[in-house]
Amino acid sequence: MHPVVLLIGKLPHVIGNVAQELDHLPIQWLGAHDHAETVRQLECEPRIACVIMGAGLDDQVRGDLIGLIAMLRPDLSIHLKDRASGPQGLVPFVERVVRMEVLDRRPQMSSS
C-alpha cells in the first residue's frame, strides 16, 4: 500500500498534472482545491502522510487552510510552495518534499 499525499492547489487540473508527471513515485495522490474538499479529504483518508500546498491560492486562503489542517490533523506536516519559482516549479517542489518527507522516512524492509 502506497503512502498518501494530499496536494492542494488553485485549479483541479494542476493537481492532476502533478500526479501524472510524478506517477513514477510510489505515492497515492489526493487533491483538493478549496476548503470543503480539503476537509473531506482529511476526514475520509486517515493514511495521509503529508500535505503540499501550491502557490496559486491567495494568502488568506492559504492561511485558513493551514489552520484547518493543523486543527483537524495535527499529525501532518504542511509544505507550502514558494511563489518565485512559478507554476513550473510545482512538480520539482512536490517531488523533493515527497522524497524527503515520505519516501525516505518509510520503514526499511529487512533483507534477512
Image (cartoon, helix red, strand yellow):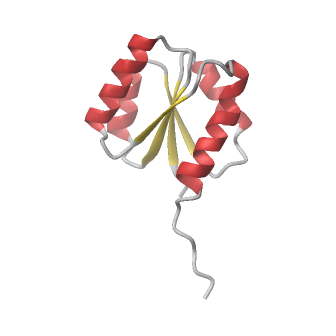
Residue 13: quarter of image: top right
- Looking at the image, residue 72 lies above or below residue 34: below
Residue at 64% x, 52% y is 26
Q: Where is residue 102 in the image (x, y as percent from the top left)?
A: 54, 52
In the picture, the quarter occupied by the C terminus is bottom right
Q: Which of 71 and 33 is in front in this view?
A: 71
Q: Position of residue 5 (x, y in %)?
A: 51, 41
Say left or right for 97 vs 21. Answer: left
- Looking at the image, residue 107 lies above or below residue 13: below
Residue at the extreme front of the image, as rendered = 84
Residue at the extreme bottom of the image, as rendered = 112
Say left or right for 48 vs 23. Answer: left
Q: How many marks?
A: 0
Q: Position of residue 64 (x, y in %)?
A: 34, 19
Residue 82: quarter of image: top right
Residue at 58% x, 58% y is 104
Q: Position of residue 68 (x, y in %)?
A: 31, 27
Say left or right for 19 vs 107. Answer: right
Q: Which of 73 and 28 is in front in this view?
A: 73
